[in-house]
Image (cartoon, rainbow, N blue to C red):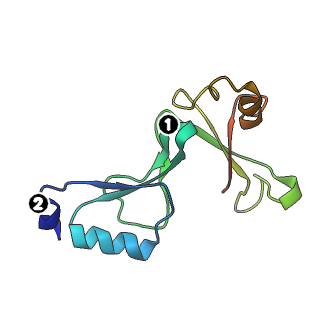
Amino acid sequence: MRALLGGEVELMITGSAPISSEVLNTLKVVFSCPIREGYGQTETSAPATLTGLYDSESGHVGGPIACVKMRLKDIPEMEYHSTDNPPRGEICFKGPSIFRGYYKDPVKTKEAFDSDGWLRSGDVG
């Protein structure tokens, strides 16, 4: 299978949508190379998290990349709190790779950020 891709594959990266552990583990064997999984969105300049190069465990998207801070924001109406065990809430981002706003759209920009500058993803973690 590796030869079908030219025989020079050294690394693959997946993102955009969750991939099951079973599929990811199969791909690692089939293509005989590390496959890193990331999580982010356009507004985070693509990845905000990324698995380690030789992380053999599937089922997670790794930790934050070096320039990104992350936190969970409480969602009281869903009874999700960052103080829960395990913590739950809306995933928020901050850092130099996070966009500053939507082009010529201050209303959407204001909706996207908390008052303290954290980008709200809309995703629950």
Name the secondary structure under disc 1. loop
Looking at the picture, how far across and down is residue 10, in whole percent? 20, 54
Residue at numbered disc 1? 45
Q: Earlier in the sequence, mark 1 or mark 2?
A: 2
| Quarter-of-image position of residue 103 | top right
Q: CA distance from mark 1 to mark 2?
A: 30 Å
Name the secondary structure under disc 2. loop
Residue at numbered disc 2? 7
Q: Residues within 10 Å of mark 1 (few under 14, many from 20)?
A: few
Q: Residue furthest right?
A: 77
Q: Which mark is residue 103?
A: none
| Quarter-of-image position of residue 112 | top right
Looking at the picture, how far across and down is residue 45, in whole percent? 49, 36
The amino acid pointed to by label 1 is Ser
Looking at the picture, how far across and down is residue 37, in whole percent? 42, 56
Vertical relation: 26 (above or below) 116: below
Q: Nearer the viewer, residue 76 or 23?
A: 23
Q: Residue at x 23, y 73 (%)?
A: 30
Q: Nearer the viewer, residue 122 or 117?
A: 122
Q: Residues within 10 Å of mark 2 (few under 14, many from 20)?
A: few
Q: Residue at x 11, y 65 (%)?
A: 3
Q: Is residue 105 left or right of residue 34?
A: right
Q: Nearer the viewer, residue 1 or 54?
A: 1
Vertical relation: 60 (above or below) 112: below
The amino acid pointed to by label 2 is Gly
Q: Residue at x 72, y 50 (%)?
A: 90
Looking at the picture, how far across and down is residue 98, in whole percent? 56, 32
Q: Nearer the viewer, residue 98 or 82?
A: 98
Image quadrant containing the C terminus: bottom right
Q: Is residue 79 left or right of residue 125?
A: right
Q: Residue furthest top?
A: 104
